[in-house]
Image (cartoon, rainbow, N blue to C red):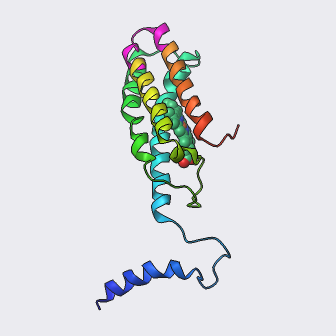
């Protein structure tokens, strides 16, 4: 057998033994696939946040209204939010990876998809009215409610 094959087999079998010498008790094998999936979805959410912050600060009169900036952020959000569907495709329940995602995401996938769709719609609306200050501020607030509504149902409540 080629050495590389042996190494691969060893890597595949080792975690099953569940007795890594000097291992830390009952901490199971790291679920690499789940870890990668959580990292990826957090990356999408982080980009969503950075694009949501300017419009919501404008809506709260904390920074000056800037139509071009709001337009740019809203267009990006309408592009990023649909990625949540792919980003949450991997079921990470019970993986032991640190996450605030609730199990209900994979128990009620249709409801979760509905929250994504409604947030996308709100982002598109924000993009459509970015040139009108009052409408833009209302639309940013509305989008914020969509973020919050999904967090209420599908994310660990840490406030
Ligand atoms: C369809 C549901 C859904 C929508 C819509 C949604 N989120 Fe979230 N968000 C989640 C879930 C679930 C988590 C927890 C992810 C985890 O810990 O694995 C999360 C976590 C986050 C995080 C923390 C990411 C991290 O690094 O831990 C940020 C920031 C965030 N969301 C921002 C937003 C913003 C801004 C919006 C709206 C523009 C939004 N989210 C809309 C479901 C959603």
Residue at the farthest bottom position: 1
- Please state the horizontal and vertical placement of residue 34, each as a whole percent of the image: 49, 59
Q: Classify residue 41 as left or right of residue 159.
A: left
Percent from the top left, x then y, of residue 50?
49, 34
Highlighted range, magenta: 126-137
Q: Is residue 149 visible?
A: yes
Residue at x 61%, y 85% (from the top left corner): 21
Q: Main secondary structure of the magenta part?
A: helix
Q: Is residue 54 left or right of residue 62?
A: left
In this rendering, the answer to whether 13 lies above or below 44 is below
Q: Is residue 155 above or below residue 40?
A: above
Q: Quadrant of the N terminus?
A: bottom left
Is residue 127 inside the magenta stretch?
yes
Outermost residue, left side: 2
Quarter of the picture holding the C terminus: top right
In the rendered image, residue 136, in percent from the top left (x then y), is placed at 46, 13
Name the residue rendered at 42%, 34% in the picture: 81
- In this rendered view, identify the residue nearer to me: 56 or 86: 86
- Residue at x 66%, y 73% (from the top left corner): 26
Q: Between residue 8 and residue 152, name the one nearer to us.
A: 152
* Residue drawn at x 55%, y 22% as measured from the top left: 57
């Amino acid at each position: 057998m080629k050495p590389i094959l042996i190494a691969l087999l060893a890597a595949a079998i080792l975690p099953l033994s569940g007795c890594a010498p000097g291992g830390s008790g009952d901490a199971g094998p790291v679920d690499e696939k789940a870890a990668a999936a959580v990292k990826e979805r957090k990356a999408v959410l982080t980009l969503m946040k950075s694009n949501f912050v300017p419009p919501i600060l404008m809506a709260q009169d904390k920074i000056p209204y800037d139509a071009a900036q709001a337009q740019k952020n809203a267009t990006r959000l309408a592009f990023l939010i649909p990625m949540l569907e792919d980003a949450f495709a991997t079921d990470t329940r019970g993986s032991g990876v640190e996450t605030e995602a609730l199990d209900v995401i994979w128990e009620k996938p249709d409801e979760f998809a509905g929250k994504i769709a409604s947030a996308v719609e709100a982002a598109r609306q924000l993009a459509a009215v970015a040139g009108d200050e009052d409408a833009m501020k209302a639309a940013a607030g509305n989008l914020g409610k969509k973020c919050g509504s999904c967090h209420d149902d599908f994310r660990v409540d840490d406030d």
